[in-house]
Image: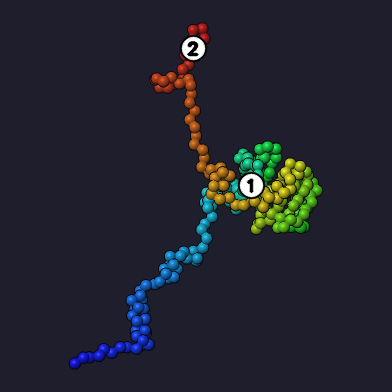
Amino acid sequence: MIRHARVLPVLVLAPLLLTACGSEKAGDPGPSASASASAPASAAGPAAAPGTGELASRAQAMGVAPELVYVTEAPGFTLAQQSVGVLGDDGFSATWVDGETNALLRLAVDRGTVTADTCPEQPVGDMSGEHTTCERDGSAWYRTGAGRHEYALPEEGHVVRVSAETDAVPRDVLRAAALAAHRPDAAETDRLLPSAEPAPATPVERGDLPPYGDGAPDNHVDVGG
């Protein structure tokens, strides 16, 4: 006797196939889950600023507060390494020199603030007793007095100042240098601040020590001497 196979209707067969496929891939997280698992967690926060530890040790060895160390740049100007030093109690100052004109660009950072009321009372370039004019320029103050001009940028608890002689450095160059002032990274710290480690002592080689005996100086006196 011939038995006829029962054929399931398509509407019944389709859900069964989908169920089987789903059970086979139940352990597979899928591409979207894999991507999210490998992505870094945003809760980790930004990485520490490069060179922070080295900056702190070098600045403190000079007597400068690390948060007051800044660096800037201007076309044609290079850092005068010997000018880097402490300003006031724990402030910071450094000077950049134009190799062609010998013009000086001074960066000074110290505690305090600048407001519309106090700006005229603060001399430009530490020249006390001189009249100071103040002009607001964005978030900075453009100040002139005693043949010098300066851009002062108030920060939280301190002021960043970039100044120069009025006739030596144009205002636009001064402004650009002031706006370029920033906290140094690791490479800039290495170029800007001297090492906190003392330089090793260099032994002095004496030329009058004989190559034999106990090494005592040769005090031989010639005849008649």
88 or 53: nearer the eye? Answer: 53
Give the alpha-carbon distance from disc 1 to disc 2, as whole Å. Answer: 62 Å
- Name the residue that disc number 1 marks: 73
Q: Quadrant of the N terminus?
A: bottom left
Do we see residue 181 in this rendering? yes
Label 2 secondary element: loop
Label 1 secondary element: loop
Answer above or below: position of 219 versus 223: below
* Horizontal and vertical percent position of residue 47: 51, 58
* Horizontal and vertical percent position of residue 78: 63, 41
Which label number is shown at residue 100? none
Identify the residue at image location x=72%, y=49%: 172
Position of 6 compared to 179: left or right?
left
- For the residues carrying marks 1 and 2, which lies nearer the camera in this image? 1
Classed neighbour count for the residue bearing mark 1: other residues with Cα under 10 Å, few (<14), some (14–19), many (≥20): some
Mark 1 vs 2, N-terminal side? 1
* Horizontal and vertical percent position of residue 76: 65, 42
Position of 147 compared to 200: left or right?
right
Which label number is shown at residue 221? 2
111 or 76: nearer the eye? Answer: 76
Identify the residue at image location x=46%, y=65%: 39
Do we see residue 58 in this rendering? no
Position of 53 compared to 99: left or right?
left
